[in-house]
Image (cartoon, helix red, strand yellow):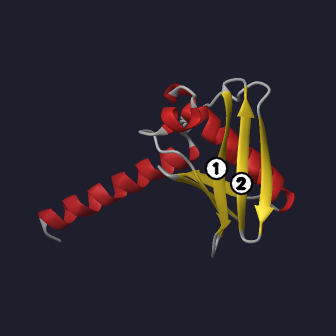
Amino acid sequence: MSALMKAKLIALILFGAYAVWLVFFSKAKPTKMVFSEPKGATVAFSTSGRSGQVVYTGPEGSFAMYWEFGGGDVIAIIDIPNAATWEAQTRIPLEKRMDILHFIGRKTVEAQTTGGKGTYEIKEKNILIKTR
């Protein structure tokens, strides 16, 4: 066996051992982002055919968003103001945007999925409510 092949084999064995150590013995926890839930806030839903409105009401103010049914593993799509237009459309400070969007996502999954077992994904211009 050539020296190059031996070096590759040793590198592969070391990498495998390191991967096993990471999976089974590492105490490191994955980083989890924490968002503050707006106190006293609510999310309400209205339906008109295959679409409707999601209304957020909180201590900072309230605003309505359009939603429509999705396809595949996406149950619904909620249109949201992007970061550039957030304050103009909602009258709420931009620094509260992600807290409010996560609150809307969580409350929508709880109220609109079977047993609250869906997930949500926040994009720049919408929130996707998914089955998994």
SS label for mark 2: strand
Of residues 122 and 64, the one drawn nearer to the viewer in this rendering: 64
Within 10 Å of the Cα at label 1, are there few (<14), some (14-19), or many (20+) other Cα atoms?
some
**What residue is pinned by disc 1?**
65
Q: Which residue appears at 69% of the width and 43% of the height?
A: 104
- On-image quarter of the C terminus: bottom right
Q: Does the image show residue 129?
A: no
Amino acid type shown at disc 1? Met
Q: Secondary structure at mark 1?
A: strand
Q: Nearer the viewer, residue 88 or 98?
A: 88
The label shown at residue 14 is none
Q: In this orientation, which residue lies closer to the viewer: 72 or 61?
A: 61
Q: Residue at x 66, y 59 (%)?
A: 67
Measured from the top left, where is residue 39 in percent x and y?
Answer: 76, 24
Please name the residue that numbered disc 2 is placed on. Answer: 53
Residue at x-position 54% and y-position 49%: 23
Residue that extends furthest to the left in the rendered view of this protein:
3
Report if residue 47 is visible in the image: yes
